[in-house]
Image (cartoon, helix red, strand yellow):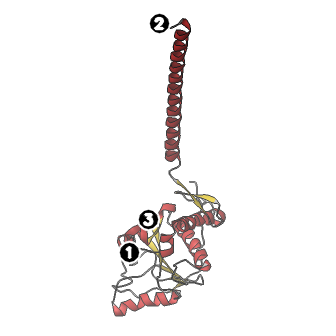
Amino acid sequence: MERTEREKQIEYETYLAKRRALKRKKRQRKAAFQILMSLIIIIIIGIIGWQSVKFIKGRNGKPVSVKSELPKKIVKTPPDYDIQYLTVNPYSRPGIPLEKVNGVVVHYTANPSTTAQQNRDYFEGLSLSGETSVSSHFVIGIEGEVILCIPCDEIAYASNERNADTISIECCIPDESGKFADATYDTLIHLLAWLAGKYDLETDDIIRHYDVTGKNCPKYYVEYESAWDALKMDVRNYIEHNGAIEETTEE
């Protein structure tokens, strides 16, 4: 049966409508692909441009950033510390020179409620018992007190393969959580800020025992990565607010 002119017209218009719809879908897909590629490029540029910045939540819960470079300032005064050098012995103070400091390693004592003095005396006792080899340059107590057990130009038995190029800090803890008491934390921040300036260190040079060996030390700051990031940010802020630009002498 022969189709009428009207039927032919409707068929042709339907064909044109389908063709226009197909072209429209192609344009939409092309536009979506271009947008996606643009977003990918922006993300890649962002990663490259900001790879030295890590966004975290600080103590006040607000987003902050930890940069790999610390402020170009020097904290010239360390926290008060008591010098009680260990006896030179094979188990806790070998007397081996530490020729270059490339970092600071933070530890925790893993024995809740013990004092800085008790931990220092334990290290000293190893010279007689010889039961193991362990020590630290500094020990920070729960009240924020600090004992320097080994001169910073000698190695301590604290951080395995990093003993040869790092300063070690043991922090006492009040309970099994491993979280530092406020006084311990504040002293640690001050001490880290001072050591960073003394040895020209950056944020990435402040590490945990965990970062060397995978050991769960310091426990709380391994289990809560954001707490460790916040700690390093607090070091940065301490330097910014309490440090001074190092003066250079022109010849």
Q: Residues within 10 Å of mark 2 (few under 14, many from 20)?
A: few
Disc on res. 102: 3
Q: Earlier in the sequence, mark 2 or mark 1?
A: 2
**24 in relation to 237, above or below:** above
User: In the rendered structure, which amino acid carries the disc numbered 3?
Assistant: Asn
Report x, y in % for residue 197. Answer: 54, 65
Query: What whole-number distance in Å separates the C-alpha atoms at marks 3 and 1?
Result: 14 Å
Q: Residues within 10 Å of mark 3 (few under 14, many from 20)?
A: some
Q: Earlier in the sequence, mark 3 or mark 1?
A: 1
Residue toward you, 38 or 25: 25
Q: Earlier in the sequence, mark 3 or mark 2?
A: 2
- State the SS at label 2: loop
Q: Is residue 182 visible?
A: yes
Q: Quadrant of residue 234?
A: bottom right
Residue bearing the label numbered 1 = 97
Report x, y in % for residue 47. Answer: 50, 47
Disc on res. 2: 2
Of the two numbered discs 3 and 1 in the rendering, the one whose residue sits closer to the viewer? 3
